[in-house]
């Protein structure tokens, strides 16, 4: 696909990062970088189609088994695939398995679309992250190799100092804030060859260090509201994504479906989306 072309369709595959968690809307749903990117792409292409199949908490094996075939069937112009990070954050992680399943996903998705987009996901600074950093970097090295072999784009969010700033992360310390999601959307937008609208790597203004007492209060809140439940799910084999489907996947029909802007014939700011009952095979 020629970069900076008119992309007529987008499918997003992955976990909570792509689902959009922590970029909450007033109705309690999530928006996230993939939705923001879709809105911007839709403003350039009549009849634009979008499907977000990502589900929070999913491991790479679940992403491959539950999302990739449905995504490939849509034959989109652009497919984004972000997965494997949840595996690296588990106490026990078989990196050989992670690489194998990720390769399976890329081999399934790359031929189904005109441009596959992979990512080196961001990681916040801190002692907990340091424990898992070697696994993350092994994953990202393999992502670069897969991209070279399959002609995929890689968006390097991991190398962006701005996204490592703790202020870019929500109170759960696992998901980006709304500003973080906006920056990711801009990063993918630029990777697809679009003219930059802002500097997504711009550093946040310097601020005075947080006082010790305030940090301790924040740490206690984080442990009580997020860390303990997360550990509990790990110990019991549960996931926050259990029983959930992607926003644009019908469990009853067993397939994904497109959504399109309400006024899909006239590119411009998206005022709302509607479901397309029978997916078109766009190329």
Image (cartoon, rainbow, N blue to C red):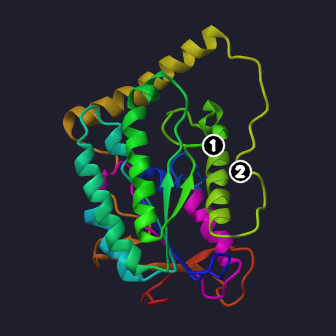
Query: What x and y, as percent, mark residue 210?
Result: 68, 16
Q: Is residue 49 magenta?
A: yes
Q: Is residue 214 in view?
A: yes
Task: Tell me the CA gap for discs 2 and 1.
Answer: 9 Å
Query: What x and y, as percent, mark residue 157?
Result: 57, 48
Quadrant housing the N terminus: bottom right
SS under mark 2: loop
Residue at the image position 39 percent from the left and 26 percent from the top: 131
Mark 1, residue position:
160
SS under mark 1: loop
Q: Of 68 and 240, which appears nearest the observer?
A: 68
Q: Is residue 56 above or below residue 271?
A: above
Query: What x and y, as percent, mark residue 231?
Result: 31, 30
Q: Are the residues at dot 2 and dot 1 in contact (C-beta closer than 8 Å)?
A: yes
Q: Is residue 250 in view?
A: no
Q: Is residue 192 left or right of residue 226?
A: right
Q: Is residue 240 left or right of residue 75?
A: left
In the picture, residue 132 is in which quadrant?
top left
Query: What x and y, as percent, mark residue 181?
Result: 61, 51
Of the numbered discs in the image, which one, if any, rests on residue 200?
Answer: 2
The label nearer to you, 2 versus 1, is: 1
Of the numbered discs in the image, which one, if any, rests on residue 218?
Answer: none
State the extent of the magenta-drawn residues as a range.
Answer: 33-62
């Amino acid at each position: 696909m020629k970069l900076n072309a008119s992309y007529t369709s987008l499918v997003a595959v992955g976990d909570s990062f792509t689902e959009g968690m922590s970029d909450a809307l007033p109705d309690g749903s999530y928006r996230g970088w993939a939705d923001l990117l879709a809105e911007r792409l839709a403003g350039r292409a009549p009849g634009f189609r979008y499907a977000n199949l990502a589900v929070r908490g999913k491991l790479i094996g679940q992403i491959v088994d539950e999302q990739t075939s449905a995504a490939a069937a849509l034959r989109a112009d652009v497919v984004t695939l972000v997965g494997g990070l949840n595996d690296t954050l588990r106490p026990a992680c078989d990196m050989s398995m992670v690489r194998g399943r990720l390769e399976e996903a890329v081999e399934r998705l790359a031929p189904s679309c005109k441009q596959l987009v992979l990512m080196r996901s961001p990681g916040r600074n801190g002692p907990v992250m340091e424990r898992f950093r070697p696994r993350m970097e092994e994953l990202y090295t393999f992502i670069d190799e897969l991209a070279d072999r399959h002609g995929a784009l890689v968006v390097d969010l991991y190398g962006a100092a701005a996204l490592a700033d703790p202020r870019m992360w929500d109170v759960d310390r696992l998901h980006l804030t709304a500003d973080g999601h906006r920056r990711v959307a801009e990063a993918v937008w630029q990777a697809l060859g679009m003219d930059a609208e802002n500097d997504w790597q711009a550093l946040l203004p310097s601020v005075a260090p947080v006082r010790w007492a305030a940090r301790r209060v924040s740490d206690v809140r984080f442990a009580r509201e997020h860390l303990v439940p997360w550990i509990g799910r790990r110990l019991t084999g549960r996931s926050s994504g259990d029983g959930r489907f992607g926003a644009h996947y019908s469990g009853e029909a067993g397939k994904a479906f497109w959504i399109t802007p309400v006024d899909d014939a006239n590119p411009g700011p998206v005022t709302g989306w509607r479901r397309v009952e029978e997916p078109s095979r766009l190329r």
